[in-house]
Amino acid sequence: MAGRTESNASAVADNDTVQILMGPTGSVMERLGYRLPDFTRVSWTSEDARSVWQPRLAAIREAWKRIECLSVLEGIRPRAIVSLTPEELATWPRRFYPKDLLFIPLQVQGAPDHYSSTVAMPTTSRRISFRVAVSHRGRMADFLGAWDADAQDRIAELLGYPLCCFEFFRRFWIEQGYRDTTWPAAAATGVAVIGQFESSVEINTPPETNVLCRWLGARAVPHLPCTFDCRESVVLARALLNVGVQSGFDGEVQWLLQILRWPVEWSALNGIAEIKTPIAKVSAATETTSTKYVVRRVGDGYPAEGATGITFPYSTVKEQAADLFLTKGVL
Ligand SMILES: [Zn+2]
């Protein structure tokens, strides 16, 4: 691979960079201007991995939804948006009403089986869910006003997203139309090796801001961080995880942190992202490019059920980080 190491600075011409200058530079991908419809496909690396981790991931997704609501109740952030099934929408508002928490539906959507960057349209052949705003009673009007006005900066502020991450979101999602910000965030974190046919970056970053497993439903922040080591996002994630531990979801929080510590590789080519984890490979829609982009997040743990192999992110050594487990109140 022809390649050259650089940070986010634009390329500087020298004897061997002429071809490289024609390719992508820094955090901006060279995109082709169209995008495949959203899809997510998961293939497990083994039956062993599936039988152990599929139910754990389901439990993590359920716990995360509750943690998002409880974070508002606990004052960690002013408001949240969650996806609720019709059954949940029929029961949660009444359950939380005595605690002064309101649930207002914002949108009806096709029930997502996995993380999706866009809202799926409801159809007669699939279950539906509701995007619902969660807020203390006295603060809901403020949020609904921002929502109806499509005031993205105000919405982000009211959802408790760090300002640095909103500025990143504004630049890439709103202004440039990205729906997968993995490469821009990774290239702003580590040193990107920009090549004519392949660009790559290796990152060694906190588990709390690892959003490369969000397609499996494993994430510790509700937003897309501006970098994979965004300090403010780490602080928010720890507060949310602490809410989970204090609310009886300590098992789910431990599993989530295990997953977020594993090595993971994200790559994108021709509009399809491949996310390789020790237990599953995910295919999903991403930005469409004719050259390959690769992000490798170095891990410090590996599951006993994980696939073995000599290429990244697979390992021949299965061990878990010694300092992994949290106890109540540690976070
Ligand atoms: Zn940030």
Image (spheres, helix red, strand yellow):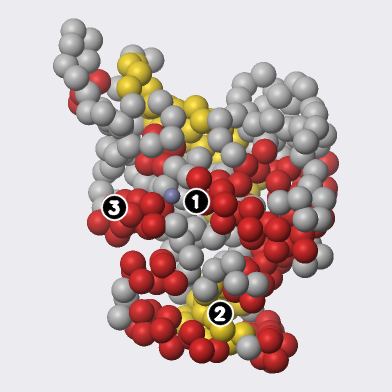
Q: Mark 3: which amino acid?
A: Arg
Q: Residue furthest top?
A: 15
The image's mark for residue 232 is 1
Q: How far apart in space, not on screen, are marks 2 and 3 (Cα)?
A: 27 Å
- Residue identified by numbered label 3: 171
Kindly identify the residue that appears in the image at 51 percent across and 30 percent down: 203
Q: Residues within 10 Å of mark 1 (few under 14, many from 20)?
A: some
Q: Position of residue 269 (x, y in %)?
A: 41, 37
Kindly identify the residue that appears in the image at 43 percent across and 81 percent down: 143
Q: Count the numbered circles shown.
A: 3
* Residue 330 visible in this rendered orientation of the protein: yes
Query: Disc 2 on helix, strand or loop?
Result: strand
Q: How far apart in space, not on screen, are marks 1 and 3 (Cα)?
A: 18 Å
The image's mark for residue 134 is 2
> The N terminus appears in which quarter of the rendering?
top left
Of 266 and 78, which appears nearest the observer? Answer: 78
Query: Disc 3 on helix, strand or loop?
Result: helix
Q: Residue 280 sits in which quadrant?
A: top right
Q: Residue 149 sits in which quadrant?
A: bottom left
Query: Disc 1 on helix, strand or loop?
Result: helix
Q: Position of residue 91 (x, y in %)?
A: 70, 88
Quick check: is the Cβ at mark 1 less than 8 Å away from ligand 1? yes
Of 31 and 123, which appears nearest the observer? Answer: 31
Q: Is residue 23 above or below residue 42?
A: above
Quick check: is the Cβ at mark 3 less than 8 Å away from ligand 1? no
Q: How far apart in space, not on screen, are marks 1 and 2 (Cα)?
A: 22 Å
